[in-house]
Image (cartoon, rainbow, N blue to C red):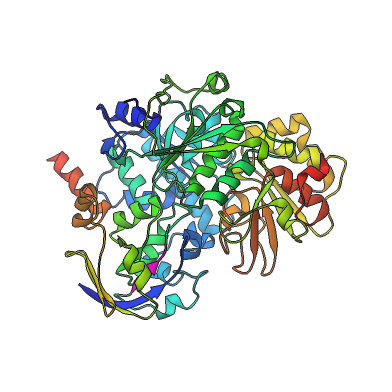
Amino acid sequence: MSHGIVWKYGDNVNTDVIFPGRYTYQIMPPEEMAKHALEDLDPGFAAGVKPGDVIVAGKNFGCGSSREQAAACLKAAGVQAVVARSFARIYFRNAINLGLAVLQSDEAADALEAGDHVDVDLLRGEIRSAKGTFRFLPLPASVLGIIEAGGLIEYTKKKLEQEQE
Amino acid sequence: MGKTLSEKVIGRKAGQDVQAGEVVSVSPDYVLSHDNSAAIINEFQKLGVKKVRSPGKIVIVLDHIVPAADEKYAQNHKSIREFVAAQGIPHFFDINAGICHQVLPEQGFALPGLVIVGSDSHTPSYGALGAFATGIGRTETACTWATDEIWLRVPETMRIDISGRFQAGVFAKDLSLKLIGDHGAEMANYKAVEFAGPAAGDFSVGSRLTLANMSAEMGAKNGYFAPDDKALKWLEGRARGPFVAVASDPDARYESVLACDLGALEPQVACPHTVDNVKPVTAVAGKTVHQVLIGTCTNGRLEDLEAAAAILKGRKVHAGVRVLVIPASWEVYREALKSGALAALVDAGCVILNSGCGPCLGAHEGLLAAGEVCLSTSNRNFQGRMGHRDSEIYLASPATAAATAVTGVITDPRDFS
């Protein structure tokens, strides 16, 4: 379980504003990516975000480019979860593959506002706040194995090791 | 109950009968990557295996920042060339091929009935020729190199029944923008989009590529046309191997069906900063622009350059505008040299750049300063995408772009027909 503050944004938060294209083809470590997180949407985010914070947004979060840094930079910045009405499909896959929790909840997206204090309980599938407790859609069984392994790289590594044995 | 193209193609690869909603594991026919191969190689090296499993399935095209704009990009390209040589990857296209989404069709990789995954969001483009093609991330690409396997959820399908004929000055790009404007940027999130109806067969392969490419901006997993005689003829002499052309059954199950009449359509413009902020060109005509970009994987084919040349031939680019033209591939470049389109564009005052992604993704070759406005034939107008976060991008067809280049303000191309 983690505790944090809500950063609230609208619909169609795209990967260009999460992680600008001018950095996309530069290979940089995650802590460097974190400095550019949401740079073109909210220039104050990278300096203000604290470990455990939660992003709450509207529909189609992560639309646009397939760039994985748009998930990696938020994870590196300490974001525990992104809660949205819906996610763009490549973003959803990328986030799972990197171990960033992406949670779908219309109720939480409606109720939570910037600055709200929240607890996210991934195991129980709950987001708790002074405004109430919100449940989110459970992740498909097919991807739970990836999350349990700690991301797709670890999952695949284990699978390849098992094949060789 | 019949099956959709996606159900048939994925089912055949999975070796089992599948329906929308099922999750299956498949071995893809091709795995695309581009300049981001450098980052993918880094991920691959964490997996503890030395060799990629199926080198012949990997296709790498350098297109995003070509030629290398600085030392970092040069090092990325160098790492990729070294990896390609060490792994014996036969399908490598260096900086003189073009944009991956034009190169894979031209070079006969994008074929009906194939499953193609690519670490680029516009991979659905290959549905123009009846492939099941979808975008994935870098980590997934690295793992697919190692395992030759990927999980896919079989998508539900939205069918778009297209009828009627375009008026002069209206094109496939206008249709895609109108659909996205009317139904929103997540209209087809996670879904397949089938372009069908009595007018679907009238679209050239180039225009089909435009529509399948723009299905990514609808949120689609894949977008496609049924492979017909026109597609098969286009593939003659190009196809790299055998393929089975499949299409949806007449009694396939569709999640939804939209109808659209081309005759009622006007030229469209997507306004800043979302692709679904779409207005008829008449509503934004007169807006001053500083740069016009004609090209990209959406609209950089011969028919696009010729549509622009038809307007710019014998005219001059407005003094207040920089016009960048980027043929989608070197094959297109050579065709446009022969057809005279490039000469007309150069004579008008356009700057012709080498084939590649150019400034579309904001890395090099014509970025925007604060306060500048660009009208582009590309597929995204997100804030800051082509330069400063206080610049603006409008999206439109090549004809609208050319008309705008002449006047210096957003202009209805029908004024020139």
| Image coords of residue B23 (percent x, y) | 26, 40
In magenta segment, residue B373: no
Question: Looking at the image, which is closer to me, A115 or A50?
Answer: A115
Classify residue B195 as left or right of residue A132. Answer: right
Classify residue A103 as left or right of residue B399. Answer: left
Classify residue B322 as left or right of residue A121. Answer: right
Q: Using the rendered image of the protein, determine whether residue A46 is visible from the camera's viewpoint.
A: yes
Q: Which of the 4 image quadrants contains residue B297?
A: top right
Q: Quadrant of the N terminus of chain B?
A: top left
Count of marks overlaid on the render? 0
Residue sitting at the far left: A165
Residue B394 vs B201, above or below: the answer is below
Question: Looking at the image, which is closer to me, B49 or B110?
Answer: B110
- Identify the residue at image location x=39%, y=55%: A91
| Image coords of residue B362 (percent x, y) | 58, 58
Residue B270 vs A38, above or below: the answer is above
- Which segment is the magenta one? A54-58
Question: Looking at the image, which is closer to me, B324 or B223?
Answer: B223
Q: Which of the 4 image quadrants contains residue A106?
A: bottom left
| Image coords of residue B121 (percent x, y) | 46, 47
Question: Looking at the image, which is closer to me, B405 or B47?
Answer: B405
Residue sitting at the far right: B314
- Identify the residue at image location x=66%, y=31%: B165
Q: Which of the 4 image quadrants contains residue B245?
A: top left
Q: Using the rendered image of the protein, determine whether residue A77 is visible from the camera's viewpoint.
A: no
